[in-house]
Amino acid sequence: MPLVYALLMRLLFDLSNFSSLFVLMSISFLFLVPFVMGALTIYFSPIEQTRKNAYTLLAPYIPLTLFAIMTMILKLEGWACWMMAFPIFMIFSSIGGLVGKSFQKKHDTILVSLLVLLPLFSAPIESWIGSHKQTFKAYNYIDIEAPADKIWSLVTRVSKIKEEEDTGWLNKALGFPRPVEAELNYEGVGAYRKAIFTNGLVFHETVTHYAHQKSMSFSIKANPYEIPSTTLDEHVVVGGNFFDVLNGTYELEKLADDKYRLHLYSHFTLDTTFNFYAGIWARWIMQDIQRNILKVEKRRAEQS
């Protein structure tokens, strides 16, 4: 029953005819649907099982897992989306399990019936309130023992990064494109920088500030129509409805003779009703990309 319920909600929240009322990237779907799934799982379980707290908390994970597998088989959702959404599904399904246990004790079928409709009531209210676009910052730094000119030449232009050089474990786990190279037509304000990733992902960058061997800032633009549909899930595509990268900055700080600290930070926006949770994942992903690039630049500068 909870599995069928989840599949029906997934189809309903994705219907274009009701897109003004029901949105997949919403609290109503990502938080309340697993809550109801957990409540249904426990309410309809044998009472001798629900006496065990472990069963109440963990049993809802069974329909959740089946739901995830089915949506991936049917290509309704991708692996990356589920990796980010599953922790929230687990937490709220366990909370729902506790609620379902209390309803089971009271034999309260009316409240269970109303609970099933909760996402349908909350979704239009959530749509009416609307999402809030918010800007976040991702920051990394690394210490490099090499002359400034060696480091800076690797900052402005990054030659092809081999797969074995890639240490971005989080983006690998999510199946996201990895950085390949960065090209710059000249050094100065107004220069065009092209950051190329695998699977056809390209960031078009324009240098907005330049201080030789000290700092470089650039705006970042990713055109969604240029990105193949198989590269990123529609819910996490760069430049799409929910996530976009705005700019990046390199700063080179001298620590000692031939020892420098290279700073890299970027700003990105999220436009969801649950930025408080999406922001955690987005920052981790951006920091993983930046950390990966800084490690490549450090290794190359010190080896040269």
Image (cartoon, rainbow, N blue to C red):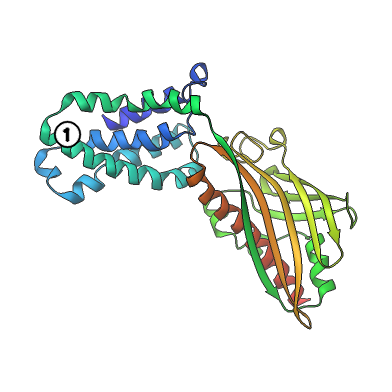
- Taking the spot 88% from the left edge, 49% from the top edge, the residue there is 190
User: Looking at the image, is 167 positioned above or below residue 235?
Assistant: below
Image location (x, y in percent) of residue 91 = 34, 46
- Taking the spot 28% from the left edge, 44% from the top edge, the residue there is 94
The residue that mark 1 highlights is 103
Residue 233 visible (yes or no)? no
Outermost residue, front direction?
129
- Taking the spot 54% from the left edge, 33% from the top edge, the residue there is 131
Outermost residue, top direction?
17
Which quadrant of the figure contains the N terminus? top left
Q: Quadrant of residue 284?
A: bottom right
Q: Residues within 10 Å of mark 1 (few under 14, many from 20)?
A: some
Left or right: residue 254 compared with residue 92: right
Image location (x, y in percent) of residue 290 = 65, 59
Image location (x, y in percent) of residue 147 = 81, 77
Q: Quadrant of residue 146?
A: bottom right
